[in-house]
Image: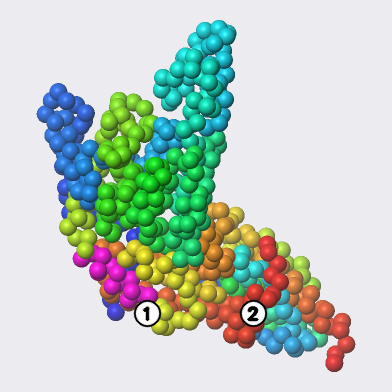
Amino acid sequence: MAYNDKVIDHYENPRNVGTLDKDDPSVGTGLVGAPACGDVMRLQIKVSDDGVIEDAKFKTFGCGSAIASSSLVTEWVKGKSVEWAEGLKNESIVEELSLPPVKVHCSVLAEDAIKAAVADWKKKKQQPQG
Amino acid sequence: MTVKTPIYMDYNSTTPIDPRVLEKMQPYLRDVFGNAASRSHQFGWVAEEAVDYAREQVAKLVGATPAEIIFTSGATESDNLALKGVAHMYGMTDADKLLLDSIAKGHAQGTLPNAADMVPPRFGSVDLDAIAKEGAFELFKDRGDHIITVATEHKAILDSAKRLEKEGFKVTFAPVHKNGLVDLDALRAAITPRTILVSIMMANNEIGVIQPVQEIGALCREKGVVFHTDATQAVGKIPVDVNALNIDLMSISAHKMYGPKGIGALYVRRRKPRVRLEANIDGGGHERGMRSGTLNVAGIVGLGAAAELCTKELEAEMAKTRALRDRLWHKLSTDLDEIFLNGDPERRLPGNLNVSFAYVEGEALMMAIKDVAVSSGSACTSASLEPSYVLRALGVGDDLAHSSIRFGIGRFTTEEEVDYVGQLVVDAVRRLREMSPLYEMAKEGIDLASIEWAAH
């Protein structure tokens, strides 16, 4: 199967690969997928006090489309509010990367990852700082 | 380093036509166009002569006699013919026997005046009076309905077996050991008095393991069961002798041994024992009635020429491809940690290397080496979204099945290509592992198996 140019670009030049300190209270981590299914995404966001995503990092085990989907999401959410990130829909990723039907699950996983990251950050915020 | 890209390293999938083979074929695509079945003029005679010569070339490669070679459109057709042909010739299902009983009953009671015409032709002439008297189950108690094959077979075998299952035959899919080799004890235990056929491939298309065909053949002889082997990957790659290996039926493909696509053969033993088949394709009675259809003369000439080259060059080619394969494995296993060879390391085709690169997904790796043609057992490369059923049958975890790459090395592979690909793969795996959350977790000492992953 031939890959879309945007997928190839993200795959070859992935944005924001890396790791944020998961113990930092301003960092939210989302880890979704399963090795047995062939894809695992870890998406992390660092959120400012006024709810703006200052930084985002990812690491992904998966096919080119999975890597591209997570790379794209980190690029999109930087500088946006957590509410914006929460409202992100996988269809936008499908559209931007022109993913074929067999690769739609990669975009679903990326949506799940960013939502899990925001949820993790919220959970931390509610807990009293020790 | 200067190598020409793209690089073809998928020889288990198909092989290019050897230029020497193409040269032999060309006249038969142009001037020599006669129908090999035309017995009344020289156009036909010349074509028939070419077919006869090719039959000898193929027979010689596998130690058969020319009359035992039936040309087909390829190994898939050969597999279908072997399984369905044997099942229908020798087998009779319970449903068949019930049918015969009711026809015989109608015949005896006079309610079915055309009873004899209602007997399916594949049973030949049956004695309806005897059936009415003794019952089909008693009369045909020696006609079995059981077939044994293996979980790691090619789909052409598995799906033919499943088709027969739908017709009422019973199929056992025998297990394999972790190294991909068939469990001989389990196989022996699976054979019953009702078993009519055992079909086990000689060499696996994904992991290249070579089954103990000689032992399996001896076991089948001992039990009086027909033995078929799909030798698509083996013929022309390793020495094959149908007598030494106790083979009754064997599928052969031209395009896996530097011949053209669309042509293959089925070896059908003629002596000790003589194996009979019901044809799948009816028509003009070509190929001793087992496979009708005007012969593909150019293709057959190509298959014959390819077989002759393999007969002459097999030993040297085995040594060459094995050395290149071992060179690639040495490079990968020296430079990378946590990589696993799938399939037995010794009993395997010389040109096959199937490796799982832990923490890296196969399709992503293929994308990183996009100028190199290889295959992957990853689900993402298949339409089904299921990882390789062959690796699963070996007990390879789904995660490692997703991480597998099959390298196929062959006649035209060079040392430069192997070195180039080796370095490319090493670099790509390192880059993708830097991007892999699993690799990071594993390096931190987290046991990935202890995590409750949400399956999706």
Q: CA distance from mark 1 to mark 2?
A: 28 Å
Would residue A75 be counted in the magenta stretch?
A: no
Looking at this rendering, what residue extends furthest in the left direction?
A: B42
Which quadrant of the figure contains the N terminus of chain B?
bottom left
* Residue matched to label 2: B447
Q: Nearer the viewer, residue B218 or B64?
A: B218
Crowd around label 1: few <14 · some 14–19 · many ≥20 (10 Å): some
Q: Amino acid at mark 2?
A: Asp
Q: Which residues are the magenta region?
A: B316-329
Residue B305 at x, y percent in the picture: 19, 49
Q: Nearer the viewer, residue B66 or B182?
A: B182
Is residue A117 visible in this depiction of the protein? Answer: yes
* Residue matched to label 1: B331
Give the secondary structure at mark 1: helix
Q: Amino acid at mark 1?
A: Lys
Residue B193 at x, y percent in the picture: 48, 40
Splitting the image into 4 quarters, where does residue A14 fall? bottom right
The mark closer to the camera, 1 or 2, is 2
Assign the magenta stretch its main secondary structure.
helix
Splitting the image into 4 quarters, where does residue B279 fall? top left
| Residue at 34% across, 43% down | B249
Please state the chain letter of the residue tagged with numbered disc 2 in the rendered image: B
Q: Are marks 1 and 2 on the same chain?
A: yes
Q: Is residue B78 above or below residue A129?
A: above
